[in-house]
Image (cartoon, grey):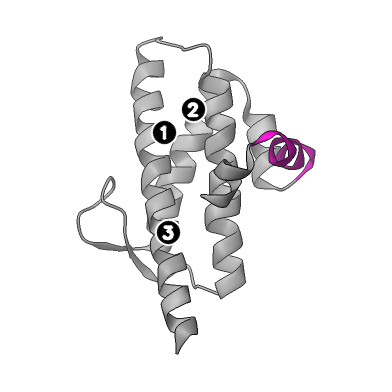
Amino acid sequence: MFNIFKTGKEFNKMAMIMNQMNVILTDMELRLALADIKEDDREVLFSVAFMGTKGVDDRMEKYNWGIESKIIIPSINSGYINLMYGYQQILGKMFSVSELLGVTDIVTQITDKQEAYYELEREFPIEFLNNI
């Protein structure tokens, strides 16, 4: 019985992470379209890619959630959407921003859990890692 509550809590946490990712990426996308590049944009993007890999991909795999599952991501839609649609929207923005910043290779390394992912994992504070 408690496993159902834990699974629900983890699904909700994943939805909040996806919403956070979308808000950050939407802001970055709009700013970059106006050529308003900030010094820390690359690091923020790497953090978002890490959040997606650890907070979304790993949870989907661990709890065996199907891509057709219904989810609410308020920054995308106020109602239920399927997980695939929501994640596609977010990944599209993430790779669009990575192209504008010229860091697509590094973002791909993070999403594919290659060296850049583990490098970030070693650098991030434990509090950040625990909140993903």
Under circle 2, the secondary element is helix
x and y percentages locating residue 98 in the rendered image: 55, 28
Q: Quadrant of the N terminus?
A: bottom left
Q: Please say whether residue 27 is one of the residues in the magenta stretch.
A: no
| Residue reaching furthest to the right | 115
Q: Which quadrant of the view contains residue 93?
A: top left
- Other-residue count near label 3 (Cα within 10 Å), few / some / many at <14 / 14–19 / ≥20: some
- Residue that sits furthest to the front in the current view: 127
x, y percentage for residue 58? 61, 60
Q: Which residue position holds label 2?
A: 97
Please name the residue that numbered disc 3 is placed on.
13
Three-letter amino acid code at the position of disc 2 = Val
Which range of residues does the magenta coloring cover? 114-124
Residue 98 or residue 131, whichever sits in front: 131
Q: Position of residue 100 (x, y in %)?
A: 51, 20
Label 3 vs label 2: CA separation?
24 Å
In the orientation shown, which residue stands out farthest toward the bottom? 1
Circles 1 and 2: CB distance less than 8 Å?
A: yes
**Looking at the image, is mark 1 or mark 2 earlier in the sequence?**
1
Any mark on residue 25, and which? 1
